[in-house]
Image: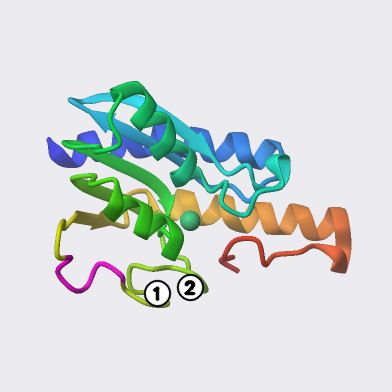
Amino acid sequence: MIQDKDTHFMHEALKEAKKAFEADEVPVGAVLVHKDKIIARGHNQIELLQDATAHAEMLCLTAGASVLENWRLADTTLYCTLEPCCMCAGAMLSSRIRRLVWAASDLRLGANGSWINLFEHKHPMHSIEITSGILQEEAAALMREFFQKMRKKNGAKTDLSALGAID
Ligand SMILES: [Zn+2]
């Protein structure tokens, strides 16, 4: 049952990632779930907003706080298609989400074990329950497809440094 819910919500996060893909943004998507309902969505908008902090997870957490009218995102689960980076992992701890579910590893910037692990030590104020690898194949395939597309489009000019890349 829990597995089914996770798959369902990760599909929704993947829909967000596809919106980023269509906009030539690194395809990362996130949804925030509260009481089995999606209350916020986000996809990577770094290029659009010209803002290095405009990661899917950050936009989703901000939108969720606005819906709940509370910066403490108690009893929420954040689904994201990529392992979070340091910035997003920090924001997740600060916003007190209860649970994090992510799909594909980010070998370069992942802050849940791929590069470093910010969730490894018990946080003094808050700890987050984590599940990883849900729809991993789909999320990783979308990333690969994106970088192939961008290489074709821009050749060597493509700047892959904005977000970690799986290739
Ligand atoms: Zn991030």
Type of secondary structure dominating the magenta stretch:
loop
**Is residue 85 in view from this perspective?**
no
Estimate the x, y position of residue 148 in percent, counting from the top left: 72, 58
Residue picked out by circle 1: 114
Q: Amino acid at mark 2?
A: Leu
On screen, 67 above or below 108?
A: above
Q: Residue at x 14, y 69 (%)?
A: 122
Position of 16 with respect to 21 (left or right) is left
Residue 107 badge? 2
Seen as rendered, the residue at the extreme bottom is 115
Position of 22 with respect to 11 (left or right) is right
Estimate the x, y position of residue 38 in percent, counting from the top left: 32, 25
Q: In front here: 31 or 89? A: 89
> Residue 118, located in which quarter of the rendered image?
bottom left
Q: Amino acid at mark 1?
A: Ser
Circle nearer the N terminus (1, 2): 2
